[in-house]
Image: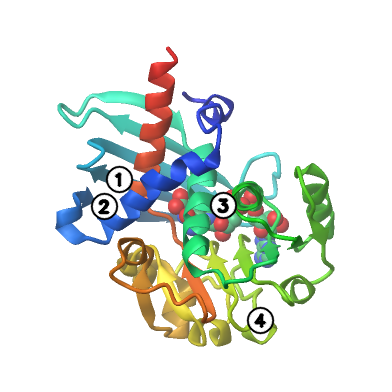
Amino acid sequence: LGEGSKVEKHFPSASLLIPPLETALANFSSGPEGGVVQPLRTVVPVEKYNGFLGVMPAYSAVDDALTTKLVTFYENMKDTSVPSHQATVFLFDPRNGTLKAVIDGTVITAKRTAAVSAIATKFLKPAVADVLCILGAGVQAHSHYEIFTELFSFKEVKIWNRSREKAETFAQSVKGPAQVCSSAQEAVTGADVIITVTMATTPILFGSWVKSGAHINAVGASRPDWRELDDDVMRNSVLYVDSREAALTESGDVILSGAEIFAELGEVVKGTKPALSEKTTVFKSLGMAIEDTVAAKLVFDSWSSSN
Ligand SMILES: NC(=O)C1=CN([C@@H]2O[C@H](COP(=O)(O)OP(=O)(O)OC[C@H]3O[C@@H](n4cnc5c(N)ncnc54)[C@H](O)[C@@H]3O)[C@@H](O)[C@H]2O)C=CC1
Ligand SMILES: O=C([O-])C1=[NH+]CCC1
């Protein structure tokens, strides 16, 4: 399962991922009782090349699945034939530690991240959500477009990218409507749900543009000194995160704005914290190893049953 195209076949519908991911998020937010063991990821900066290596191990007792993902992510890559993010997931037999599979992690990362944003959106989007805005036009923009148009019925999808050319290629390649906007402000104006999926390190989304009551999935900016959202949007929204510990260690948007975390998404899934969908909400996603564990198990089980 070393190639992305082989992994892709085991995700016939992205929505298959939603139930196991919801269970994983709830278990993660239940503390030791939930049976999730997931230390904060280790990130090694490769300063000379503006790159990072992340090591993301996790064990889920409920799934009896043990994995670690190795993921590299590089800023400002000159060679555009190489993706900015590359990943591999190692799946172990938890009974004896034997390596069972080495699975391409790039497709898993794209699919599970978009599925988690879709879960946040299901709970936090306003009652009427007609307009979707995507800022960015890379791998995550594609996976988010795919699952969001599969699960929700937006009347309009607006897209902006730093280079307009890439936004236009995106709009031509997706299987549905996408309106290319000339500025991020134009794309955000009037949007009910906003997804930020860029490699930006300074804000690209400003609170003064955001419609009151909108829901924002903030997916990029995973370093403590990187931003995608300005202080205004961070401080004037109800803030949900995947992991409190990770957000307070890794998220520049959370740390530098000083915004208060209201809940983990897993607490909303469990029903121990409310989904304040009538308010303007931000889901700050950093990506969790346990999401890779359940996605890798799904791929491996599907592959095993077809071989
Ligand atoms: N929360 C999570 O679980 C995960 C988050 N990510 C993050 O999502 C973001 C998008 O990832 P991919 O789509 O894989 O990357 P990508 O490289 O495929 O796409 C990045 C997009 O951002 C644009 N961009 C680059 N630099 C920019 C800048 N300074 N300002 C504005 N736009 C800029 C590029 O034109 C491109 O369209 C990244 O920040 C990545 O680290 C990625 C994987 C998981
Ligand atoms: O969860 C993940 O794999 C990542 N989050 C940010 C960069 C990669």
When asked about the image quadrant of residue 207, the answer is bottom right
Q: Do the residues labelled 2 and 3 touch (CB within 8 Å)?
A: no
Identify residue for label 2. 38
Say whether disc 3 or disc 4 marks the residue closer to the N-terminus: 3
Say whether disc 2 or disc 3 marks the residue closer to the N-terminus: 2
> In the rendered view, would you say 225 is above or below 179?
below
Asked whether mark 2 lies closer than 8 Å to ligand 2, one says: no
Please name the amino acid that badge 3 sits on: Tyr
Residue 273 at what x, y percent from top left? 32, 73
Residue 217, label in figure: none
In space, the residues marked 3 and 4 are separated at their CA atoms by 32 Å
Please name the amino acid that badge 2 sits on: Gln
Say whether disc 3 or disc 1 marks the residue closer to the N-terminus: 1
Any part of residue 40 in sight: no
Identify residue for label 1. 57
Please name the amino acid that badge 1 sits on: Pro
Labels 3, 1: front one: 1
Residue 74, label in figure: 3
Q: In the visual, does 194 lie left or right of 70?
A: right
Packing grade of label 3 (10 A; few <14, some 14-19, many >=20) is some
